[in-house]
Every structure is written in C-alpha cells, then in structure tokens.
C-alpha cells in the first residue's frame, strides 16, 4: 500500500483539538459526533487507499492529453471518479437540501486531506466543484440553484473557477473577458481564460464554469467585474443536456507537477459568444469569487498537509528498509537501517511535526468555520468567523510553504534514489510547488493577513488569539512535565514575537506600507508557525492527560514527542523572524531597482 | 541572452575578499594577478554566455539517450565540448607540466561557476574530469600520469568517479566490486557501479574511469578498498587507442533534473573482466578517492551558487517585465512591474544575498586552497589547509541547501508561469535538488564538519575562525556607518551562537554522539550562514571604503545593501538554530522507532 490514511491522528485532532462533541451540539449537526466522524473517516480511508492512491503515479506518467479539443484524463481516473461520485463524497459537506450529507467541515476537511494525499491531481476536480457549489449556494438565483446544484453536489457534473487571463494573474483588476447582455436575460461571453484546472476533461457529463467577466459599460478595475455561470453543455428545462456551448479548450499546459490535472486555456466566444448566466448582481463578481476563493484557499492549505503526509510516509518506509552505515553511538555492530541515524530522525521528525502541526491548525480552523456558519448564538458565530478568517491565509500560506520543505526532505531521505523519478519521492516535490502559487500566492495570502485580517481591526483578532495562546501557556505551566515546560518556553517566546509584529503591522500599515509589506510573508510564516505550534501544545496537554489515564500510551508518547520537537526546532525560529520583520524592513527596500 | 556572467561581482570578491594580489606573490602564481583574473573571467564569460548557456534548456528537453550501449548526448553538446577543450578550459587550474595553465583555484572557481550557471548538466563532465586529474596527480604512478594526464588536462578524454553500488551509497564499506590480479601487474575488475555521471557519452574519444574495488583477500570494510583506473578503450604504448575494455553502460537513469547529464549504470567484467590499473597502493583507495571527493565537493558547492545565480537572473528579468497590481504605497497610479512590490523585492534580495554570500565564501576558501598548496611558508600552508578543510563542507552543504531555497523562490517570483515547464524557472528547481545529495549528502558533509573538522581538533579551527570574525566586527564598529552597525549586531550574535555550538560539538561528540549528530546539519547551516555573512560584512567594509574614494558608487551601494539584507534576514536566524542544536537534541531522538 502506497498510502495509509492517518485516521487515528485525524480523530485525535477532531476530538481533542477541534472539539467535535461541541460541534455536535449545534442544531443540524446532532448526528455529527465522534462516532460519525470515525465511521466516515474509516470508510473514506478505505476508498482513498484502495481506489485513488494507486492512480497517483500513473497520473504522473500518463498525464491528461488534449486530442482535438477534448481532454483524455489518465487511465483509471474516469472509473475512480465514478466511484467517488457514487460514494457520495462530493456532497459530504454540502446541504442535504441539494442531496448532500450536510456534515461539518471538521469532518469534511479530514476527508479532503485523504483524497489529496491519495492523489493531488485527482482531488483537484472535486476541490474546484466545491468552490462552484459554495458560490452558487451563496449568490445564485433559485433558478441557477435548481438547475445546477443537485448535479454538482452529486458529482455528476463538475465545476471550475475562471479568473486568470494572460495579463491578469494576481491582479484581477486587469480582467478583460467581456459579457454582452442578450435580450433573454442571459449574456454572451467573449475572452480567453488561462490556468483553468479541469477546464476540460472526460470524467463527467457536464462542466459548470464560473467565469469572471465585465459587462459592457461596467466600471474599470475590480468594481466592474461580474460572475457568470457558463455550462459546457446547455441545460434544457427538464435538466437534460442540450447543445455544446461556445467555450473550448485550445491547449493544456506542460507543467512541473500535478500533471494528471488538466490545466486548460479556455476560449470563450469564438463562434458567436458563449452563453452565460449572471450569478447574483452585476459588478459584485469579485465578492462572490472570494467565497469560492476562501473555500479553495483553505482546501489548498489542506493539499499542503496532504502531500506532506504522503511524502512523510514514503520517507519513513524507505528509512526503515535502506541499510547504510553503523549508528554513530556504536549501538549496532554493523550497518543499520538509516532510520537509526540521528540526522534521518531529524528529517523525519521535521516532516512529521510540520505535517501534524498544520493538520491540527486546519482542524481547529474547520471547527471555527462550522461554528461561524451554524451556531445559534450570533456572538459565537461572529467570534468564530473572525478566527476562521484569520486562519485562512495561515492554513493556505503556511501549510503550503511547509509542504515545499517537507517534500524536499522526503527526496533527501531517499538520497540518490530520491532523484530517480521511478522512486516517486520526486513527484511530491514537483507536485507541491504549485501549492504556494495557485489560489493566491503566498504573498497574496500575506497581503490578506496584513490588510483585511490584521490592520483593518487594529490587530484585535490577532491579539485575541495571542490571549488564547497565553492561556495554553498557563496550562502547560500547570501540567509541569519536562516536555510541557520545554514547549511552554518556546511557545511564550513565539507569542511575544508575534505580538511585537502585530503591533508593528497594526501601527504601520498606513504610515509605512512598504515597510509592513516587506515583512508580510515573514509575518504569515511567524503566525502560522505559532498557531500550529500552539495546537501541538494543546495536543501535548491532551496526550499527557490521556496517557495518565492509561489510554493508548505509545500513541500519546509520540504526540508528546512531536509537539516537543516542533517547539524546539520550528517554534524556535519565531524570535528571529520577528527581528527580521521589525528591524529589517529597510534592507528589503534599500536596493535601487536598477541595481538588481 | 539567458545568462550574463557576474564578472564584476566575481572580480570584487577575488580582489577584495580573496586577495588575488597576495596570491600573485606566491611563487608560480606571479602571472596570476588581478589583470589576469579579469582577462580570463571576461573570456570565460563570453564563451559560456554564447556557447554553453543556450544549450541548457535544450538539454532538459532532449536529454542524453541510450542506444545499444552508447549514449547520445544532447544535440549541440559535442560541438560545445570540443570548443571547451580547444579553449583550454579543462586545464585552467592544472599543472603546466601536463599541459594545463597552472592558474590558482581563486580564478578557476569563478570560471567553474560560470560554466555551471550556463549549464549544470554540461559542466558535470569537466567537473568529474577534474576529480580524476586530482587523483592521478596525487597518487598515480609516473606511468599512469604519462599515459592519462595530458589527455585529461587537454579535455581530449574525460574522467569519471565510480564509487556507488546498489547497496553502497553513503556507506562505502559495503563496496563489493572486486579486482583480481593478473600476472602482468594489471587487474581484472568485476562488478556493477551505479550513478556514474558521464559514465558513457559521445563527447570525447576515451573515458577514464576511476573505480573503487576490493582486491581478492582484502580486509572487510573501508580498509580493504583500492582505487583503479579503467579506461573505456585500452591505450597502446604509443598513446593510440586500442581495444574496447570490458566496461559497458547497461542503462541510464530517468531523473528529476540535470537530464542532459547521463547517469550511467556501468557493468564491469561481463566478458571476462575489465582491465584496470592500480592507483597508488592497495587498500588505500578511499584515501585517494577523498582527494577527488574534496575537489568535487567544493565544485558541487559552486554548482549551488551557479544555479542560484541563474535562477536569480531569470527572476529579476521576469519581475521587471511582468506588470501586475499597484504599488502598496500608492507611488504609481496604475499597475506596476512586480519588482516594485515589497515582497517581490524581498524574494529577489533573498536570492541575491544567499548567492553573493556563498560566492564570497567560496572565493575565500579557494584562496586558502591556493595558499595551502603553494605558499612557501609551511606554517602559512598549514593554517590555510585547516581553514580550507573547514570550508569544504560549508561550501558544499550550505551553498547547495541555499540553492534549493533560491531556485524555489525563482519559481515563486514567476507565479503561475513558474510552474509551466516552458518558462524554464522550474528546470533550475529540478536541477538543484541533486546538489544536496551527490558527492555526499548534506548529512555526510555535516558528519565531516562535526567529526574531522571540529571534534578532532577540539574546536580549535572553528574558534580561530570565530576570532577572525570578531576582528571583522571590530572593523565594522570602527567603520560606524548605519549599515555597518546593523551588520555588526547580527554578526556578533551569530558568532556567539556558533561558539556555543562549537563548545557543544567539541565537548559532546564522544560522550553523547546521538545528541551531537542530531544537530549536525543545523550546525553546518549555522556555520555556513555565519561564514557567508562574515564575508558579506567584509565586502560591506570594502565597498564603503571604495565608495568613499568615489569608486563605482552604484555598485558599492548595492554591495552594502546586499550585506545588510543578509544580516537582517539570514544571519538573524543563527541564534534560533543555536537553541535548536544545544537545547533540542533530546526531541530529535525521543521518538520510538516503531512510532514513526
């Protein structure tokens, strides 16, 4: 087996960090307690381990191909996708009203991690469909909902997000795709969209494109962008498929990684205009797109965790089997499996600690999402919404950046074998590199963290999180174990470093924007590092208490060891990052542009 | 032009940091002053920019191929190699006695960087030939020297290093290739060697394999390994090529990067035994191989600098031309080239500072090599040898690890375009990943730094280097500029962190080897970080003084800005690394092996 889902670790987080029992008290989630989580995760693990994971390497070797405007996906993908849809996995988190299972994100996110560990390329198709569903749920008319949502939630049809154009990447103000109103209330869409994930494929009967475009006469910039639904095949009143719409795939990209996922250039309107339907109101497209984006950004963060987990598992397996050199402490007379060597342990612990830390952070963020959307108390919803929104750039930015380091270490553990493509470790390294780029680069996440999430409320949410962390520090002090003390020291130092940076950001964003944005990505890294470390500190507290009750001692010991490693080796970076941000802005901007 | 050699920066280092004028006072190097350096570097730049660099992308797209036991290299490589050999570039640093130019390594290393920036895959062939030349110069008999050296130095023939076998990677004790003595004094070689760079190719008339093997009856382990010369074609008394030897390429690897460089599996002795000639004495093979390895390790470090430089240049070019979003400070009304954005500047400065820092470190190490090998004063030779040997794992380990970060940032600057293979940024990211693996992984470099370079002399060399750094701190204090003060602060903190770790390593390697080796790679990173930062601090001192004399103000300002950025953003990591090493060893080794 090439992948074994870390169900036990996920359930630990869901129970002890995310608090699934609290979530199950929210009206509508009464069935979504720990037992449900366990049952769903175990079934999900089976499906992904057996059906999806074996196609990962195949996808790298036999990527999607374009033949006469049609994309043929990797052999096996169609059948696996059919099983995915039939298993009801697409609808896991979506409303029962449209055929979904209405489970909390806290459970759904764990399932998403499994699918992505199994196969990052395959998982992108459902990931984009989720985004399309979110946008339609929030802003779609009843008619659009009736026409599209059931089919998307069932997985019969898939969704896409069409933002990017050759001149408009991070800067959506530059979008030029245009929409001309038709007399019947629909629009004709003209333009070229690039980097459209699963923009064309053969796994589903229809593709529902969500497209940013400008209605004729709309204002310049982002305030003139509207959102449209453009189906690949027109949908008749009775729901059956009609004529082919005027949107066509003209090429797919030759990429560094996620090669099985077709990245399409889509041409709209070469034959008179693609028929599109306005979502919500004109000129509010960016706002709706952000709904999709926020769902997708969280999901891409989970992709980072997922590929890190798989790289870790592969590295551990190799380190157990590869025999090379004697242990430095002379504990074995002959050559030993390399997992005995301290530096290999250090690499594996680094991989593990990052992965578990980000998983814990994502689980807690998911729980906040569930409370923010479903809790009966408005104040609770509001607090959780603020927390969740603060977490999105961290989950996206930090988890994906860490996945670059983890997948690189995964190759490194394999030595020369890692560089040979057939080994498979290099695929994770190549695949992961897109994660810090799409759905907003790390810098875009950092801008969001600085601007909308920190400066806008004067650092209030950030300081509230720091106050929660301080409470955890108090619990660590009371716990008093050697590990708790070690973690306490690093957590407190990292929190103080974070607070200094929050003061700097909240105080200087208007006065000295260049200085603040010069440190925006380091701020994101510091915040992500801290929050992941905090969650591992909480997991240490829970694990020591459970171990004290005699529960699953080996597992709890490993939890404690991982938390401590994270604190000593990763959280320990935080004060240095603080110094770079608060004292180092000048040196980022000092160089004359011509001198580069 | 895809690459422009940074001749000016190299000459700055060669003059102001490496002290070429001092080297030119060493007997034999009288002609090798600054003017020679300048003339050679300028000629070298022209050749690499025009002939070698354009073949880099071709090599990635049309890698070496195996056809019936013969390797066909990338179209254009044969002709470029012919020009390389005819230009005398292979012999640059080798003795005039064998047809070389006898120039110091201080000049040769800069030329090596250019060749590697131009084309990492192409450059590997000469790199391995250099290693073979070093080994024969040191340990070869007069007959072997007479037969092989002229042809290797001229580039007519190329060399290889044959160490690795499927079961013997980092652990050469496991080598099983065997050598049977023949009555005529030669040996018959039998075995399989893997990962042999340019083990077979069509660019030269003969290939001279240097092969580790065990003579029948030799002791177990590394003490029973001997080194042999095994030519692809036998060489007749008159120097003409004779029969094909019994060494054959059975496959070449499908790799993540450096695809144009053929990585061969070589089979020795399938047809009765490959004829080999003992180099030096039986059972001293490892010692001789280390001569090659040390030359190759330094050269691989230079590869890291080289690929980082090229990635930087590509990223800068893209950042100047890609227009996206308004500047955060509102300094431009419309969208601006992304080089205006602070985070893009931060990424470019990070790339630049790492690259210049490692280049400066490598230049100073090369100067020490020259003094260690050629200075008339024995004490000077000894001190320089100790310094150089300490530098080798730093140049190799730190420069290659930084190249992973730099090439990753290079992709990141390109955004979505970076993930598209045709852009070319991804090639550097893929190519670089081998650098932390071959010629000894980073962990192997770190073992060398801990064991042979630090613990063996009780930390004496390390502390002597720290004392030199402290002198530079004094000069920074006297200089007194804002930048000098900022750098002073970080340099002093990093040096103190380093000294703490040196005490830990020197004191604990015997008593607590697991604890020390758990921190061996972080120690290497800290030491490399410090030494590169120190050299940039020296370059700041020189640049401010030269600027004071009115020399080349823009260039000197950029030097100062780069040094300060390095101090604020890279050196600032040092204290955190110290903490992880000195206080974090337990958490590396705490996890039970079964729990991974």
Image (cartoon, coloured by chain):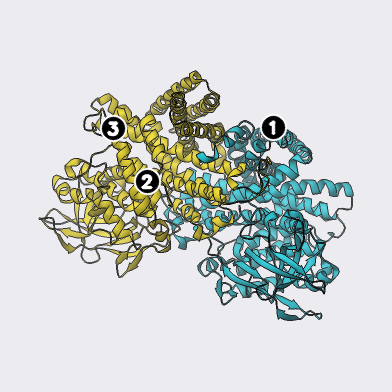
Chain colours: A cyan, B yellow
Q: Identify the residue position indicated by label 2 in the image.
A: B114
Residue B42 falls in which quadrant of the image?
Answer: top left
Q: Are marks 1 and 3 in contact (CB under 8 Å)?
A: no
Subunit under mark 2: B
The residue lying toward the viewer, choosing from B6 and A396, is: B6
Subunit under mark 1: A
Instruction: Locate residue B67 relative to residue A376 in the image: left or right.
Output: left
Subunit under mark 3: B
Vertical side of B296 occupied by B192: above or below: below
Structural distance between the alpha carbons of marks 3 and 2? 20 Å
The residue lying toward the viewer, choosing from A421 and A453, is: A453
Estimate the x, y position of residue B290 in percent, counting from the top left: 30, 43
Vertical side of B44 occupied by B384: above or below: above
- Disc assigned to residue A500: 1
Estimate the x, y position of residue A389 in percent, counting from the top left: 76, 48
Vertical side of B321 occupied by A45: above or below: below
Residue B198 falls in which quadrant of the image?
Answer: bottom left
Kindly report which numbered mark, 1 or 3, lies closer to the viewer in this rendering: 3
Q: Identify the residue shown where x is 19% and y is 41%.
A: B96
Estimate the x, y position of residue A399 in percent, counting from the top left: 63, 50
Secondary structure at numbered mark 3: loop
Secondary structure at numbered mark 1: helix
Residue B65 falls in which quadrant of the image?
Answer: bottom left
């Amino acid at each position: 087996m090439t992948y074994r889902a870390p169900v036990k670790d996920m359930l630990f987080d869901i129970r002890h960090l995310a608090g699934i029992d609290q979530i199950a008290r929210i009206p509508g989630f009464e069935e979504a307690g720990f037992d449900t989580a366990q049952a769903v995760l175990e079934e999900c693990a089976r499906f992904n381990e057996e059906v999806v994971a074996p196609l990962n390497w195949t996808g790298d070797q036999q990527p999607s191909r374009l033949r006469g405007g049609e994309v043929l996906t990797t052999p096996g993908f169609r059948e696996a996708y059919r099983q995915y849809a039939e298993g009801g996995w697409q609808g896991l988190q979506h409303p029962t009203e449209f055929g979904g299972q209405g489970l909390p994100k806290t459970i759904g996110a764990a399932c998403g991690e499994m699918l992505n560990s199994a196969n990052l390329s395959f998982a992108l198709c459902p990931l984009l469909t989720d985004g399309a569903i979110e946008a339609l749920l929030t802003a779609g008319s009843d008619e659009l909902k009736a026409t599209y949502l059931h089919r998307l939630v069932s997985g019969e049809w898939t969704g896409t997000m069409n933002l990017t154009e050759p001149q408009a990447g991070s800067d959506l103000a530059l979008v030029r795709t245009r929409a001309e109103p038709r007399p019947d209330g629909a629009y004709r869409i003209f333009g070229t969209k690039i980097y459209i994930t699963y923009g064309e494929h053969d796994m589903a009967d229809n593709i529902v494109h969500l497209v940013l475009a400008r209605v004729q006469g709309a204002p310049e910039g982002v305030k003139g962008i509207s959102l449209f639904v453009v189906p690949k095949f027109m949908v008749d009143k009775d729901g059956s498929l009609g004529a082919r719409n005027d949107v066509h795939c003209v090429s797919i990209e030759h990429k560094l990684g996620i090669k099985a996922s077709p990245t399409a250039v889509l041409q709209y309107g070469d034959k008179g205009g693609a028929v599109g339907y306005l979502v919500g109101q004109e000129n509010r497209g960016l706002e709706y797109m952000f709904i999709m984006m926020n769902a997708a950004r969280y999901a891409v963060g989970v992709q980072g965790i997922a590929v890190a987990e798989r790289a870790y598992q592969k590295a551990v397996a190799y380190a157990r089997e590869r025999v090379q050199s004697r242990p430095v402490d002379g504990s074995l007379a002959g050559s030993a499996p390399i997992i005995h060597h301290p530096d290999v342990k250090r690499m594996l612990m680094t991989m593990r600690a990052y992965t578990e830390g980000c998983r814990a952070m994502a689980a807690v963020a998911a729980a906040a999402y569930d409370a923010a959307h479903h809790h009966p108390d408005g104040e609770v919803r509001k607090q959780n919404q603020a927390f969740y929104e603060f977490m999105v750039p961290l989950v996206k930015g930090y988890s994906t950046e860490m996945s670059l380091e983890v997948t690189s270490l995964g190759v490194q553990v394999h030595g020369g074998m890692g560089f040979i493509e057939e080994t498979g470790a290099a695929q994770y390294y190549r695949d992961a590199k897109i994660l810090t780029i799409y759905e907003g680069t790390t810098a875009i996440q950092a801008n969001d963290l600085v601007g909308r999430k920190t400066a806008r409320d004067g650092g209030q949410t950030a300081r509230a999180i720091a106050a929660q962390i301080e409470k955890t520090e108090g619990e660590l002090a009371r716990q008093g174990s050697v590990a708790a003390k070690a973690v306490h020291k690093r957590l407190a130092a990292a929190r103080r470093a974070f607070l200094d940076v929050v003061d700097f950001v909240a105080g200087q964003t208007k006065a000295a924007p260049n200085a603040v944005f010069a440190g925006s990505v380091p701020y994101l890294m510091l915040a992500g590092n801290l929050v992941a470390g905090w969650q591992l500190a909480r997991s240490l507290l829970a694990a020591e208490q459970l171990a004290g009750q005699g529960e699953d001692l080996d597992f709890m010991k490993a939890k404690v060891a991982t938390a401590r490693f994270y604190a000593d080796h990763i959280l320990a970076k935080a004060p240095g990052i603080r110094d770079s941000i608060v004292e180092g802005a000048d040196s980022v901007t000092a160089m004359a542009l011509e001198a580069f």
